[in-house]
Every structure is written in C-alpha cells, then in structure tokens.
Image (cartoon, helix red, strand yellow):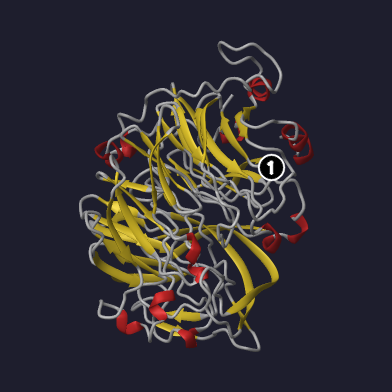
Amino acid sequence: MIQRRTLVMILAPILAGVSLGAFAQHQHGKPEPGKKDGTLFQNMSAAKGIAPDVVSGVTADRILRARSEPQNWLTYYGAYDGQRYSTLDQINVDNVKNLKPAWIFQYGNVGLVASPAIYSFEAAPIVVDGVMFVSGWEGYVWALDAVTGQVLWQYQHAIPLDTPLCCGNVNRGVAVAKGKVFVATPNGHLVALNATTGKPLWTKVWCDIRAGESATMAPLVVKNLVIVGSSGAEYGVRGHIDAFDIDTGNRAWRRYNVPKPGEPGSDTWSGDAWERGGGTAWITGTYDPELDLVYWGTGNPGPVFDLKKRPGSNLYTSSVVAFDPDDGKMRWHYQWTPSDVWDYDGVNENILFEQDGRKLLAHFDRNGYLFVLDRTNGKFVRATKFGKADWGDIDPETGKVTINKVPTVEGTDIFPGPAGAKEWPHAAYSQRTKLLYTPYIEAGATFKIREQRFREGLPFFGGEATVKGDQKGGVKAYDPATGREVWDMPNEHPMVASILATAGDVLFTGKPTGEAVAYNARTGEQLWEFNTGSGIHSNPVTYSVNGKQYVAIPSGWGGWLEGFAPELYGQPRGNALFVFALP
C-alpha cells in the first residue's frame, strides 16, 4: 500500500490533464500494450480532441435496459432504479485485497487551492463501451480512455466569479444520449456537448444566478428529455425541476416545488413566504418506466432555520415528488420532514426495489430515518431510525411526526446536525443480499434563530447551526423488509462517500481521511484499503472493458472537511480520479 506522503509526492508534479500511465505500469509490472515505458508525463500530448463514437447508439430504450450491459455505467446511479448495484463479479470478496491502481487521472496541482471549499471531486463517471465521461469542478468535463486514462477531449464552461454557491464549485456528473453529453453547470446552464469532440451543440440558461440559483446535480435522461433540478435554497429562491428536448434544447416544461396561491399545497404557506420557499432539487431523481413516474427529492424551505417567517408544513419542501416525465405534473408526494427547521432537506436518493411482488421505494433521509413507501401511490410502509436523532420521533407504523426540539434564540443542541445523519452521498441496494447499505454521520449541532431580512441574491438562513462534540460515522446495512439493522461498520470520522454494491458481494466507498475501501456486503468486514491522499466525497462506479473489471473512485474534497475532521484540515487537496483493477 502506498502511504499518503508517497502518494502526494507522486501527484504533486503532475500537470493539467495527465494520466499516470507509468505509475500503472509499475503497479502491473509491465508496460501497457502498445506503449513504451516512460515518465509520468508520457500522456501529456495524448489528447487528440476526438473520442470514439460510442454515445450515438445510447438511446432512451438502451438506458432502460442499462443493467443488461454491466460493462457500462450508462446513467448516474448505473440504472434508473437508483440501486447503485452492478452485476459484475470478477472482483469479489476473495480477491478484492489484490486491487491495484490501473491508472490515475488528475487535473491541476496538489495543494495550490485558494479556498478548500471550492474544489471537490464529487462526480459519478459515466462509461460507454470503453470511454469514460466525467465532470469536475470549475465547469470541466473530460472524455477519457477507460482503460488507460488518456484524455480524449476536454471542455470547460466559464463560471463567473460572483456565481452564488452555497457549498462549493462542484458537479456530480453528466448524462449521455444520442451522441451528446449533458452537463448542468454551476451557473445554471444546461450544455449539450458533442460526445466525440466535446464541442457545444446547444446551451440553455435555466437558473437565475442573480437570485441565488445554481446547479450541482447530474442530469437525468428520460425518453427524449433531459431533466435537471435547481440548487440554492439557502438564498431564498423557489426551487424548480425543468425538462429539455434532447435534440433541440427547447424547454418542454418546468415544475415549481413550492406552490403559489391557489395551487394544491399552497395552504401550507403563509402570505408571500412561498416566493422564497426553497424546495430546490439538487440530487438526481430515479425513474420507474412501468409506472412512468420520476421520483425526485426536494430540499429545505427558506429561510432555513426560522419557522415564524413561514409557518406551516411548507409543501412540497423536504419531500419526494412523483411526477409524469412528459409534463412534470405531480401524481403524489410524501413529506419526510414537515416544517423543516434543521436544514435536513429531502433530496437524498430514492431507491426503487421489489419485495413480495410489491413496488417499493427506500429513502435514507438526513433527518435520521429510513423510509419505505409504496411507490405506486406514495403510501407509507415503515420508518426506522438509522442514526442518532432527537429532533423528533416518527411512528414506525403510521409515519406520524412528533417534533421534540427546534432552534431557539439562545441555542438548542440537536441531533443530527445540519449535514444530517446522512449527507447527499448515496446508499445502495444489493440484488444478491437484498440489503440496503448507507453511509452515516453521528454529529450534533447547536441550532440558533436570528432575525434576518430577505435580500435577493444573498444567503437567507434566519439562524445558524454550529457543529459540536465528537463527529463520527460509518456504514450500516439494513433489511428493508423489516427495518432491522443487519450490521454496522463504524469509522472515526463521518462517512460521506456513496456506496457501490456489486455481485461479487463487495461494497466500495471512501473515507474523508482519503482511504478508498471495500467491505464484505454480508458481514461489513473491511477487505481492502488504498490511501488516495485526499478526502473522498464522491460516487464510486464500476465497469469492464475487454472482460476486465475496473472500479473508479474520484478523490478530492475541501468543502466540509474542516467541520468533520479538523485535524485533517490543511492537508494537500489533490483532486484525482483513481481507477483500480486486479493485476
């Protein structure tokens, strides 16, 4: 295993867009086919501006059947169901300990970041027939050779310095279809790139950055539409979800997640509070093609902490909305946290699975509860507490919410803190074990209310939350049939990277201290570890090329590391994509 200091020495001199081909050769003990042994800089001139034409054959129908081609990772969660599960099993519980870096891609220099809150590598790479498409910070998108890491093309969208961003200049991924790569930029542009050249084909502005809106999520392709959700609830905006025609870029529809007067749910708002109601939609939704329903989580209401400025349950914030992809019309909703004054949001993934012939949806909410719903109609099935949560109680049989603690002027200590018992990184479901797996956080905070007047384009919190005490976490497994905790693998710091489950009964994730790790999906035993040299706050994926399985884990995290692990603050912040394989 390469220690952190050694790894930083390797990464530090790397220039923009260089894949560490020679490093991969040393790991495998022989040069890559068709390449001479050389220096770390051998691929500097490899980017030719052209990628193989693999995306023109990606249709909506092919994405529907994404799990039938496990060699690829065609959409954000790997498939529409959000399970983050792969049927690849070449890497398994017996041999995962032998994983080595196959290649490493880095853009930019280590340790030269002006503000650690700006640059985090959070994306889920998309892989199509040996070509990887991945987005980064500062509006970057790259096409890479999925076997060598060679840069095929690079695109950067200019991000104005005054773009209002709550939580970092980040992007969680792209979508692909019909020869195009779609990226939602931080300043609220939806860009369709030519998948072979990286050149823009069309660009649509769909967020108002003057009002505080932005975009951080990966688009979702459904039928002939690309669907995106806005960010920026902390700025007192009115969150929305938009759909655009894949071919022309014309807007097909927009749905607001906070109803205006006269619309269903408007009675849960008072006065003109709905105009600043929040309810942004900054995590990608899931889709059931049989029901023809998209399931999308919505964020916190605004102002974040002060309920007296928005009395009521504040629909449809901190909820899941199920809507028709053709027109955006809502079929049903379920609110995870009524009158959310803890910044718990409701944006986390909605995992679709079947059990005993029933179509269900599982959701690990930041409020500390695992929910299971009937996804045909949104009816409550059960709720289970999966983290330390004293803000309120949710009846496991009825779903009734009883609030115990709220922010006060003097300050109230509440669990979980504003990052929740689980931040945005995603849980997974294994079709082999029939278990759900989630990263979790154990951290409380002191919540305070303070008087604040709304001003367009400026943060509108109405209070504050200060994390205090020990901050720990880990990974847990749950049986969705009963809500029973099956195992718990604790960690000394909060776990804030997504889980990837595979048919090899291996779970992949990462730690804020920089270790990429693998666990036994049945027991929770840690089977493998590799220190990447920077915190991991991203979406691991797996794919195969020519019969060889790879695991890709983006590394590099600045934004929330100071709060979660103060002793790590100040370590080098290299953003790099690590791709592992068996020797």
Q: Dot 1: what SS?
A: loop
Up the image or down, 576 lies above or below 397; here it is above
Up the image or down, 235 lies above or below 27; here it is below
Q: Residue at x 51, y 42 (%)?
A: 157
Report whether residue 100 is seen. Answer: no
Q: Position of residue 47 (x, y in %)?
A: 55, 23
Q: The C terminus lies in which quarter of the figure?
A: top right
Q: Is 547 situated left or right of 457 in this image? A: left
Q: The N terminus lies in which quarter of the figure?
A: top right
Query: How many numbered callouts?
Result: 1
Q: Position of residue 387 (x, y in %)?
A: 54, 69
Residue placed most toward the observer, 489 or 268: 268
Q: Is 510 situated left or right of 226 in this image? A: right
Where is mark 1, residue-wise? 574
Residue placed most toward the observer, 83 or 119: 119
Q: Amino acid at mark 1?
A: Gly
Q: Residue at x 69, y 50 (%)?
A: 513
Q: Position of residue 564 (x, y in %)?
A: 67, 62
Up the image or down, 325 lies above or below 540; here it is below
Q: Is 381 situated left or right of 283 in this image? A: left
Q: Residues within 10 Å of mark 1 (few under 14, many from 20)?
A: many
Report whether residue 480 is seen. Answer: yes
Q: Position of residue 504 (x, y in %)?
A: 46, 38
